[in-house]
Image (cartoon, rainbow, N blue to C red):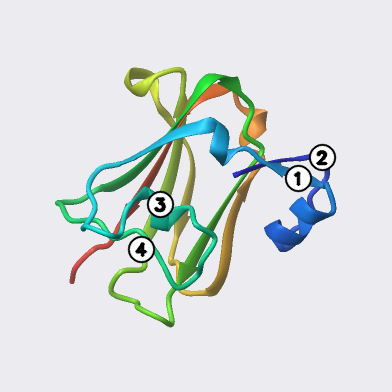
């Protein structure tokens, strides 16, 4: 999660952070999950290691909740989805919802057909009212 000034589309978020174009603000938030298997929780979701990941252990939808202690403008959300590595756990839909609390969340972005080996970027979140909660929803439709 970053706050950019001007972010070129498709740019590497880590490189942008090193050059000072964006600032990682995820550490300022409280993260929670709808469920997780032991050893596959928030720490693995946020550790910057592409070999570790979050794995839910409950019914759908699977949620990542990000709450900031004070009003925070989020301008870009970067999500790494590796379809080639494990398509059965790659989300088929990602929904981003924002609001002042869990009771007034509004969906602002939906990404369908996650079938790429690349980061998924959702930008322009900052065009919406500043938020204290970003609700990131991942679920896989089983056919």
Residue 124: x and y in percent read 66, 40
**Discs 2/4, front:** 2
Q: Circle 3 sits on which residue?
A: 43
Distance from disc 3 to disc 2, alpha carbons, whole Å, reads 28 Å
Q: Name the residue beneath numbered marker 4.
A: 92
For marks 3 and 2, the one nearer the N-term is 2
Q: Which residue is mark 2?
A: 5
Q: Is residue 8 left or right of residue 101?
A: right
Q: Nearer the viewer, mark 2 or mark 1?
A: 1
Which one is closest to the eye, mark 3 or mark 2?
3
Locate the N terminus and report the quarter of the image it occupies: top right
Question: Which residue position holds label 1?
Answer: 22
Instruction: Decide which of tag 3 and tag 1 comes sooner along the chain.
Output: 1
Label 3 to label 4, Cα distance in Å? 23 Å
Quarter-of-image position of residue 34: top left
Q: Quadrant of residue 28?
A: top right
Rendered location of residue 109, percent (x, y): 50, 43
Q: Is residue 17 left or right of residue 95?
A: right
Q: Secondary structure at mark 4?
A: loop
Is 100 drawn above or below residue 108 in the view shown?
above
Q: In the rendered structure, which disc, 2 or 4, sits on the residue that comes first in sequence?
A: 2
Q: In what element is the residue under mark 1?
A: strand
Nearest to the eye among marks 4 and 1: give it. Answer: 1
Distance in Å between CA atoms under marks 2 and 1: 7 Å
Location of residue 98 in the rendering, given as x and y in whole percent from the top left corner:
47, 29
């Amino acid at each position: 999660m970053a706050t950019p000034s001007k972010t070129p589309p498709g740019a590497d978020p880590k490189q942008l952070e090193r050059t000072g174009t964006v600032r990682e603000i995820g550490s300022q938030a409280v993260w929670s999950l709808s469920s997780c298997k032991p050893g596959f929780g928030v720490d693995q979701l946020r550790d910057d290691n592409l070999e570790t990941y979050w794995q839910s252990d409950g019914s759908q939808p699977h949620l990542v909740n990000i709450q900031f202690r004070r009003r925070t403008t989020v301008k870009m959300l970067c999500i790494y989805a590796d379809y080639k590595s494990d398509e059965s756990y790659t989300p088929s839909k990602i929904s981003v919802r924002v609001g002042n609390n869990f009771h007034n969340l509004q969906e602002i972005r939906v990404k369908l057909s996650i079938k790429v080996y690349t980061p998924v970027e959702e930008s322009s979140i900052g065009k919406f009212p500043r938020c204290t909660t970003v609700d990131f929803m991942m679920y896989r439709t089983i056919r």
